[in-house]
Image (cartoon, rainbow, N blue to C red):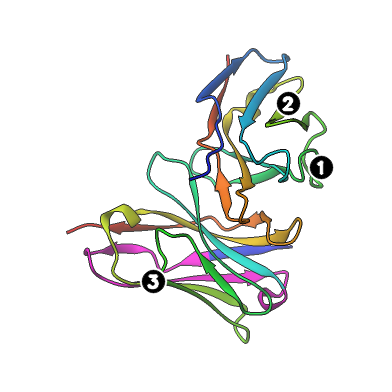
Amino acid sequence: EVQLVESGGGLVQPGGSLRLSCAASGFTVSSNYMSWVRQAPGKGLEWVSVIYSGGSTYYADSVKGRFTISRDNSKNTLYLQMNSLRAEDTAVYYCARTRIAVAGTYYFDYWGQGTLVTVSS
Amino acid sequence: SYELTQPPSVSVSPGQTARITCSGDALPKQYAYWYQQKPGQAPVLVIYKDSERPSGIPERFSGSSSGTTVTLTISGVQAEDEADYYCQSADSSGTVVFGGGTKLTVL
């Protein structure tokens, strides 16, 4: 059974940093594309970042240069390092297994339960 | 930036058919996907590649595409189908885009 469990969320001051983790079971993270998707309170879904099985990474313009996606193959875990956090980064962050539809386009077939990040002073 | 447009809300009575639309200029060239999200829960994929249904998703969920509009159809709506529904696709560069979401209310 595929399971994704996020952790690491919490309250952080503007300009601060936080690292989110997503522990996977039932499949191998390194053999799949993996993404982070966020949802601000009462708002819609926003794609944040993806890491390809080959290691390439891509980011939404809103987080480029501030967030870093990575994985630890030995722990079968996905990470999101978030630096220079802003109030507008406040959201529930979901990790999601990512499937390829056609070259360069993808979708999300399994999601974790999410972890809340609140950026506030 | 590229946008996918969904109606904010749709209401139907139990047993009726609900249709939720999603419009975008790139939809004739890109697949669409649909997610169901109930309050306090993670999204669940209900339709992929315009009209394919993942295993475990009831047959009453179907998807279709026509030009710049894709449609999620829920036949014989049940109370448990009340949720927010999001379409997802990609812009011309392949960047993931989500629609704004549609709240389905079962009267």
Numbered disc 1: what chain? B
Q: Which residue is mark 2?
A: B73
What is the x, y in percent for residue B79?
Answer: 64, 23
Quarter of the rendering containing residue B35: top right
State which tag comes first along the sequence, 2 or 1.
Answer: 1
The residue shown at (73%, 44%) is B29
Q: Nearer the observer, disc 1 or disc 3?
A: 3
Q: Are marks 2 and 3 on the same chain?
A: no
- State the SS at label 1: loop
What is the x, y in percent for residue B44?
Answer: 64, 46
Numbered disc 2: what chain? B
Magenta-drawn segment: A6-31
Q: Amino acid at mark 2?
A: Thr
- Answer left or right for A3 relative to A42: right
Q: Which residue is mark 3?
A: A65
> Please, is residue A83 above or below residue A92 in the view?
below
Numbered disc 3: what chain? A
Membership of A12 in magenta stretch: yes
| View extreme (left): residue | A121
Numbered circles on residues, count: 3
- Answer left or right for A32 relative to B3: right
What is the x, y in percent for residue A69?
Answer: 50, 73
Instruction: Tell me the distance, in whole angstroms, between the alpha carbons under discs 1 and 3.
Output: 36 Å
Give me the disc on residue A113. none
> Please, is residue B65 above or below residue A102 in the view?
above
Report the quarter where the C terminus of chain A lies.
bottom left
The residue shown at (57%, 32%) is B83
Q: Nearer the viewer, residue B55 or B5?
A: B5
- State the SS at label 2: strand
